[in-house]
Amino acid sequence: MTTRERCESAIRYRKNGANCAQSLLAAFADVMGITEAQAMAMGAGLGGGVRSGNICGAVNAPVMILGCACPEMAGSKAKAAEITKEFQRRFTERFRHLNCRELLAEKELQPTDTALELAVGDHCGLLIVSAAEILCGMIGEK
């Protein structure tokens, strides 16, 4: 899939009521080798920063996706930390925060070109699109 297709897919899930984590997990279910239903179930409790305002679903779901896309993470804590921190670095470069409560408090999130093209204007939608773009870059999808 292209980056745009991944973003479109994730936003469709979001518009159908999925939380940030579910939207991303379902859009990348093929990368993880799971079904859409499994992805939705896996992410159900992750919304709202694991229901506590902590790590955003647009951050924790991509780390799980990267774990499946980068099998070298399984055998090396150092590699897992490196890949996880790289995603976090890219995400915080755009949004400054990783926690849901802090991200929701941000007043003016700037949309990416893809978000503008897809007419995504809601807060969580912007986070989802950016997370999908970062993920695609990290797993080599164009």
Image (spheres, rainbow, N blue to C red):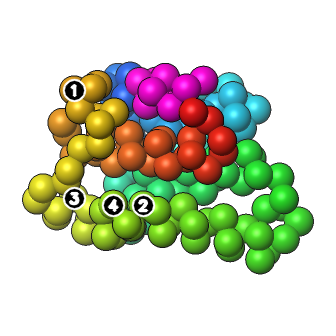
Find residue 24 and report its horizontal and vertical position in percent.
Answer: 50, 39
The dominant secondary structure in magenta is: helix
From the image, state whether disc 3 or disc 1 is nearer to you: 1
Q: Amino acid at mark 1?
A: Ala
Give the alpha-carbon distance from disc 2 to disc 1, as whole Å: 21 Å
Q: Which residue is mark 3?
A: 104
Q: Which residue is mark 2?
A: 91
Q: Residue at x 38, y 40 (%)?
A: 129
Find residue 130 and report its horizontal and vertical position in percent.
Answer: 39, 46
Res 119 label: 1
Q: Are marks 4 and 3 in contact (CB under 8 Å)?
A: no
Q: Are marks 2 and 4 in contact (CB under 8 Å)?
A: yes
Q: Residues within 10 Å of mark 3 (few under 14, many from 20)?
A: some
Q: Amino acid at mark 4?
A: Arg
Residue 35 lies in quadrant: top right
Q: Which residue is mark 4?
A: 94
Q: Are marks 2 and 1 in contact (CB under 8 Å)?
A: no
Tell me which numbered mark, 3 or 1, is placed earlier along the sequence. 3
Q: In the image, is 20 to the left or to the right of 126? A: right
In the rendered structure, does residue 9 fall within the stretch colored magenta? Answer: yes
